[in-house]
Image (tube, rainbow, N blue to C red):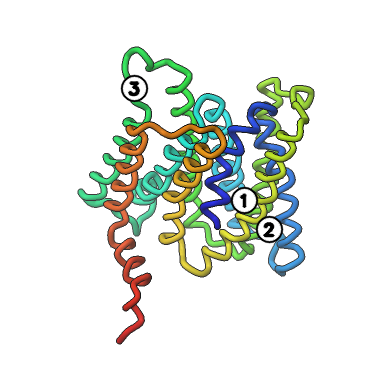
Amino acid sequence: MLAGFWGTSFVTIEVGLHHFPPILFAALRYDVAGLAILGYAIATTERWKPQSRADILSILTIGVFIIAGHHGFLYLGQQYVPGALASVIISLTPVLTAVFASAMLADEHITPLGILGFAFGVAGVAIVADPNPENLLSVGIIGIGLVFLGGVSFALGSVLTQPLETDLSLPALQGWAMMLGSGLLHVLSSARGESFAAIDWSFTAIASLVYLTLISGVVAFLLYFHLLDEIGPTELNLVAYLEPVVATILTWALFGQLVASTTLVGFGAIFAGFALLKRDALFEVARSLSPTAGRA
């Protein structure tokens, strides 16, 4: 379900960008989603007010890198590349997260196989981008670069939050971060000269905003919190490799478009890179999912 909700969001963004300025689109999405999740946190948890330095730093890190940075770059990039292609590029995020963690966290170390895994991931994005001197400055390459920066921002934010020990409930943390991120996106939108007058309030525009806000935003994030507690971050990271499948199928169903064969090859290289970087954790996940795992 989570892969479905987040995989379809790439295509929904692609549709909505025909009706909204990009940064304003992202800001409006998280205005409502942030209020809804923060309201849920207030109603269901006791620890929803930020009180400590760690609370504030966690909210700032998630709000700046994961909400504002990630979605700002993603929405700008998706003006130039289709949602299915953007989802493949974003699937590099777990690889980047592992690399950043090995560089920045004392208990994380990258091995020679891990370096090879990172190389596979970068090669995968290069295959997807298909750069050559003739298209190096094309809008497609620029779009891919922007989406890639969105993945970098998400991965960096994920690693920077790990050392911050906060007792703030996960819904409250995400709610406050979404509110901060949406505020930053509004500032950036205004600086770019975007305005509400440029929005085409058609049925399609409203439907895309409602879906991204309520389904891909509120429902999907609450499901994410539940899964994070139930199965842990390593297994949950694998959702990034189901999202491109969902996005590709939906793109084909709605627009009759399929991704190029080189995109599939690039996606395979990205997944191979993640498998090399997180091979031990993946073996543990595979053993836990095995039908014989519970037998003595």
76 sits left or right of 187 in the view = left
Q: Residue at x 72, y 60 (%)?
A: 49
Q: Nearest to the eye among marks 3 and 1: give it.
A: 3
Considering depth in this image, is 240 or 66 the residue closer to the camera?
A: 240
225 sits left or right of 51 in the view = left
**Residue 63 image point, x, y percent:** 61, 45
Label 1 crowding class (10 Å Cα cut-off): few <14, some 14-19, many 20+? Answer: many
Say what secondary structure mark 3 lies in. Answer: loop
Mark identifier at residue 131: 3
Image quarter in which the N terminus is found: bottom right
Q: Residue at x 47, y 67 (%)?
A: 231
Mark toward the start of the polypeptide (2 vs 3): 2
Q: Where is residue 93, by image quadrant?
A: top left
Q: Which residue is mark 2?
A: 50
Q: Residue at x 69, y 41 (%)?
A: 29
Q: Where is residue 152, by image quadrant?
A: top left
Up-down relation of residue 58 to residue 254 (above or below): below
Image quarter in which the C terminus is found: bottom left
Up-down relation of residue 189 to residue 175 (above or below): above
Say what secondary structure mark 1 lies in. Answer: helix
Distance in Å between CA atoms under marks 3 and 1: 37 Å
Considering depth in this image, is 279 or 14 the residue closer to the camera?
A: 14
Mark identifier at residue 59: 1
**Residue 28 image point, x, y percent:** 72, 38
Label 3 crowding class (10 Å Cα cut-off): few <14, some 14-19, many 20+? Answer: some
The amino acid at mark 3 is Pro
The amino acid at mark 2 is Pro
- Determine contact: label 1, label 2, CB under 8 Å: yes
Mark toward the start of the polypeptide (1 vs 2): 2
**Residue 110 image point, x, y percent:** 28, 51
Considering depth in this image, is 9 or 21 the residue closer to the camera?
A: 9
**Residue 204 image point, x, y percent:** 71, 34
